[in-house]
Image: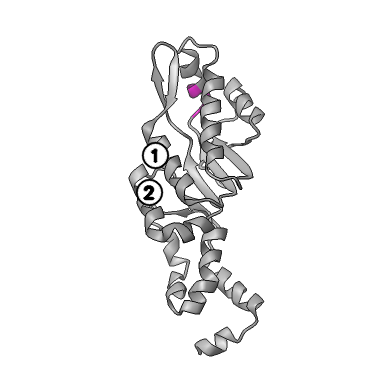
Amino acid sequence: MLANFLDLPGELRNRIYELCLLHKEPLALWTGFNQRHELSPGLLRANKTLHHEAISLFYAQNRFDFTIATPKRIALFLQTIGRKNAGYIQHLYVDFPKFCYQEPGDVTVSDDSISIFSSIQGSCANLSTLTAFADSTLTIEFTLNGLDNPESISKVLKLVDTLFRAISPLLKRIIVGVYNNDPSNFITGMENRGWTIKATRVQFSL
């Protein structure tokens, strides 16, 4: 039976792999991973040849949702799948970096956010699209304005942009999901960085 499957044209085998291994929604790894009921990952363990043919498709064409995950869980996941498989990943969802607001009028990226992006940078060298979900941009801007530093917004956006672009030289698109479409200097600053802004009042999806 297996030999007959391998005799099928490559295009047909790839279509079967797509039906068994790809999910139209992001794979939410830390929310029960209910997508397992709709996927057939056992196919990857059926045979070395099948595994070799299908594994890159699974990681490259699915979108992986790292939101709400702790730095430790993300690092463990990337370590578990191995550098080769992590290198296939092209599309990631993450939380927008968190900040530490300091006095007088200073701001830095939180240690947890730095840890998360460091893990991704060290593993996902071929990432092409990064989607980050931000809290209310108006709340962020209000807090930054309260630091009494006129350059705080620009500084934060520069720090975040550096984190994003350090992940992979192949990163082509940065998307930021915001939970309101109110105009703000923070959103304008993100657009000026070349990021794509997607506004919604419900859970964000592509």
Residue shown at the point (53%, 61%) measured from the top left: 23
Q: Which kind of residue does numbered mark 2 sit on?
A: Ala
Q: Secondary structure at mark 2?
A: helix
**Residue toward you, 153 or 108:** 108
Instruction: List the residue tagged with mark 2.
Output: 75
Q: Which one is earlier in the sequence, the residue at label 2 or at label 1? A: 2
* Residue bounds of the magenta highlight: 136-140
Spot occupied by residue 132 in the image (x, y as percentages of width and height): 52, 39
User: Is residue 179 among what the camera can see?
Assistant: no
When the figure is inspected, residue 146 is found, relative to residue 163, above or below; the finding is above
Spot occupied by residue 24 in the image (x, y as percentages of width and height): 56, 58
Q: Secondary structure at mark 1?
A: helix
When the figure is inspected, residue 135 is found, relative to residue 56, above or below; the finding is above
Q: What secondary structure prevails in the magenta region?
A: helix
Spot occupied by residue 56 in the image (x, y as percentages of width and height): 54, 65
Instruction: List the residue tagged with mark 1.
Output: 115
- Alpha-carbon neighbours of circle 1 within 10 Å: few (<14), some, or many (≥20)? some
The Cα–Cα distance between marks 2 and 1, rounded to whole angstroms, is 9 Å
**Residue toward you, 18 or 163:** 163
Q: Which kind of residue does numbered mark 1 sit on?
A: Ser
Find out whether residue 22 is within the magenta segment. Answer: no
